[in-house]
Amino acid sequence: MISETELRGLMCPPTFFDVRYKINPQMARTLQSYKKVDKIKAFEQWMRLSLLLQNAWVRLSYLPPHPNFPDMPFTANAGFPYPGGIIVSSFRHPERQGESLETGRYFSEVLGLPAQRLPPRDYE
């Protein structure tokens, strides 16, 4: 059982992090510039953040990365926690929608938390 006073965090290593599509202006600029993601730097920054949070007594859980979902390291978008469970995000962009299944499975099967999904929404 998770204590109400316990600080918890979710992280996903940037193993497959990349900019492969554009769903926001920053991604569009990156693709237009032909810049590549510095994967070593991304991993080093991720490790520093992980260590910083652990040193601040945050209990971290680690969502396994998936090769088809390069944005999974942005775990703040994974869902909305509530006491005893989580509402899993149902991302607007098709490129990210598959993450919902992965994160929902992780929350329910690994962390033992009920993972609720809201009905799909028409964003048009």
Image: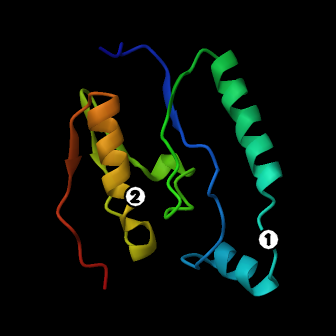
Residue 93 lies, in percent from the top left, at 41, 74
Query: Quadrant where the N terminus lies?
Result: top left
| Residue at left offset 82%, top offset 75% | 35
Colour scheme in the image? Answer: rainbow
Q: Report whether 82 appears left or right of 57.
A: left
| Residue at left offset 62%, top offset 57% | 16
The residue tagged 1 is 36
Q: Is residue 112 above or below residue 56?
A: below
Residue 116 lies, in percent from the top left, at 20, 46
The residue tagged 2 is 99
Residues at badges 2 and 1 in contact (C-beta under 8 Å)? no
Q: Is residue 5 above or below residue 11?
A: above
Q: Is residue 43 above or below residue 31?
A: above
Q: Is residue 104 above or below residue 38?
A: above
Residue 53 lies, in percent from the top left, at 65, 25
| Residue at left offset 66%, top offset 75% | 27
The answer to which image quadrant residue 49 occupies is top right
Residue occupying the far left of the picture: 119
Residue 3 lies, in percent from the top left, at 36, 13
- Mark 1 surroundings within 10 Å by alpha-carbon count, few (fewer than 14), some (14 through 19), many (20 or more): few
Q: Secondary structure at mark 2?
A: helix
Viewer-nearest residue: 16 or 52: 16
| Residue type, mark 2 in image | Glu
| Disc number for residue 17 | none
Distance of label 2 from label 1 (alpha carbons): 23 Å
Whichever of labels 2 and 1 marks the residue nearer the N terminus, that label is: 1
Q: Secondary structure at mark 1?
A: loop
The answer to which image quadrant residue 51 occupies is top right
